[in-house]
């Protein structure tokens, strides 16, 4: 009994450390990853290179997760995560090297291409440990509190990332006004590297429950793809991958549109960009509780209904206030629900022995989707010439319509995999109109009907 209590105490301590670890890594995302596209633009990257910056990173990063899942049969998962984190932290210094050589005029013509290559290596380094971390956290977080815990962790990490992102914009605008923009990127990427090193230090203090990979639980990627259309988890993976394909047809170009076409300063660009993350943070706690009570399929449904509308709203105005209160508001809430549901659905649908393997295949399918979407978007932006509207706005409209089509065709095929409370139309008020008087309940019957239609029923027989 004492042994069980001691193990429980170690797990709880590790979950607190995980929030600190995520907070440290938020400096990497806020000062580093948020500014990779602006960094590429400063190196004169064209639309194809911007598309490849996203697509190559997703494809090769996902492929490295498959390699990482196989490493679990031979190496300790904690060591794999630590190797991945420290390698990723070091890659920020390599990214700075490209800018330095370009600044000195040594590699001006190929700087953007070199950035795509090095940032792809950065993604590979970071993703090798992804399946191990996912499996590890699955053993630490209690099943009934996953939504609550990850929403809390994501909220804290998100607030820090937003703060760092905003301060970083001020740094870039200052050094840009002085004519030495590269120095601003040096400061940001050094902060990103240090933050990631510190997250690795926190990970060394995590408790690592005993874990052994059973080789009998292994199945190949092609076998997984072949069976995907016939089982619930496979349908889920196909759906998420297609949503990511249609999303990333446009995703790399919002930054380009704001910085090049709308002429935003770095500060304005960041405020508009991070507003979606702010709305994500504000909605995260409620969404986590909804997922724990009504299931992750419910969260997935909520997100799926919202996210097709977000890119379409960019067509009507480039005013920052308008974009924040419309497109970014929908994107923040929609993607918060969608992404939280996506990660927690895997925990529910997959047995512990297969978590690392299944999350690597999930990532690979998504990587392929993102690669195709971002590559097509880059080629479309570079070679399609129209006169009736801005090319990026047309890309946003296409992405919006394609997302909606995927939702209509496939979402209803996915079933909940755990026992959850039944959903009634009055429950819509929990996340749409808290505090609305009872006479207005009827206004949300339509919303409730749509959610219920797509949400479907629990499938009790499909766990991988």
Image (cartoon, helix red, strand yellow):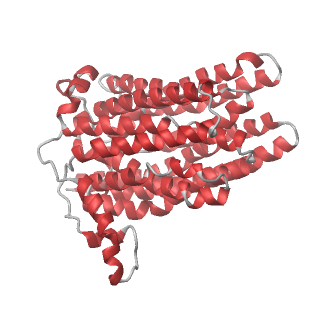
Quadrant showing the C terminus: top left
Quadrant location of the N terminus in the rendered image = bottom left
**Residue 67 left/right relative to 274:** left
Whole-percent x, y for residue 176 in the image: 82, 41
Residue at 32 percent across and 48 percent down: it is: 344
Q: Residue furthest front?
A: 388
Rendered view: 34 above or below 337:
above
In the figure, residue 424 lies in which quadrant? bottom left
Q: Nearer the viewer, residue 169 or 195?
A: 169
- Residue 434 visible in image: yes
At horizontal 22% and vertical 24% (from top left) the residue drawn is: 226
Pick the front one: 302 or 288: 302
Count the numbered circles shown: 0
Image position of 176 (left or right of 153):
right
Is 38 above or below relative to 122? below
Q: Residue at the spot x=29%, y=53% of the render?
A: 296
Q: Residue furthest left?
A: 461
Q: How far across and down, in percent of the image, does residue 187 sit?
A: 74, 40
Q: Name the residue nearer the viewer: 238 or 57.
A: 238
Please determine whether, in this image, residue 313 is positioned above or below residue 434.
above
Percent from the top left, x then y, of residue 454? 26, 53
Q: Is 285 situated above or below 260? A: below
| Farthest-out residue, right | 178
Q: Position of residue 179 (x, y in %)?
A: 87, 37
Would residue 195 be seen by someone viewing this image from the given angle? no
In this rendering, position of residue 166 left or right of residue 68:
right
Residue occupying image coordinates x 47% and y 30%: 373
């Amino acid at each position: 009994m004492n042994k069980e209590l001691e193990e429980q105490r170690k797990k709880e301590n590790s979950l607190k450390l995980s929030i600190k670890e995520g907070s440290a890594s938020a400096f990497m995302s806020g000062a580093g990853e948020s500014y990779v596209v602006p960094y590429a633009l400063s190196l004169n990257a064209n639309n194809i290179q911007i598309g490849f910056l996203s697509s190559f990173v997703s494809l090769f990063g996902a492929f490295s997760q498959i390699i990482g899942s196989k490493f679990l049969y031979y190496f300790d998962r904690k060591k794999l995560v630590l190797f991945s984190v420290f390698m990723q932290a070091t890659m920020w210094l390599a990214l700075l090297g490209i800018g330095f050589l370009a600044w000195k005029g040594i590699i001006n013509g190929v700087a953007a291409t070199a950035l795509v290559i090095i940032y792809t290596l950065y993604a590979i380094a970071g993703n090798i440990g992804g399946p191990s971390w996912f499996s590890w956290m699955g053993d630490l977080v209690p099943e009934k509190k996953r939504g609550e815990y990850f929403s809390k962790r994501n909220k804290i990490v998100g607030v820090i990332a937003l703060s760092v992102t905003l301060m970083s914009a001020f740094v870039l605008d200052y050094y840009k006004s002085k004519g030495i923009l590269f120095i601003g990127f040096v400061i940001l990427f050094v902060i990103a590297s240090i933050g990631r090193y510190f997250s690795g230090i926190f990970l060394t203090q995590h408790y690592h429950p005993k874990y052994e990979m059973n080789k009998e639980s292994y199945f190949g990627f092609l076998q997984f793809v072949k069976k995907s259309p016939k089982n619930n988890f496979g349908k889920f993976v196909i759906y998420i991958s297609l949503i990511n394909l249609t999303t990333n047809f446009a995703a790399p170009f919002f930054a380009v549109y704001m910085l090049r076409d709308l002429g935003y300063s770095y500060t304005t660009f960041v405020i508009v960009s991070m507003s979606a993350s702010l709305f994500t943070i504000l909605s995260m706690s409620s969404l986590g509780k909804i997922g724990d009570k009504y299931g992750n399929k419910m969260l997935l449904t909520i997100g799926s209904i919202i996210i097709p509308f977000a890119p379409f709203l960019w067509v009507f105005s480039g005013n920052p206030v308008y974009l924040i209160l419309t497109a970014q508001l929908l994107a923040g809430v929609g993607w918060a629900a969608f992404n939280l549901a996506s990660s927690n659905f895997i925990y529910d649908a997959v047995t512990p022995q297969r978590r690392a393997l299944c999350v690597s295949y999930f990532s690979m399918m998504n990587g392929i989707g993102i690669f195709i979407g971002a590559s097509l978007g880059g080629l479309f932006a570079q070679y399609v010439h129209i006169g009736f509207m801005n090319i990026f706005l047309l890309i946003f409209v296409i992405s919006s319509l394609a997302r909606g089509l995927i939702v209509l065709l496939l979402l209803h095929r996915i079933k909940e995999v755990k026992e959850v409370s039944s959903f009634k139309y009055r429950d819509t008020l929990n996340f749409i109109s808290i505090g609305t008087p009872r006479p207005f309940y009827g206004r949300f019957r339509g919303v409730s009907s749509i959610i219920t239609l797509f949400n479907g029923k629990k499938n009790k027989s499909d766990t991988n």
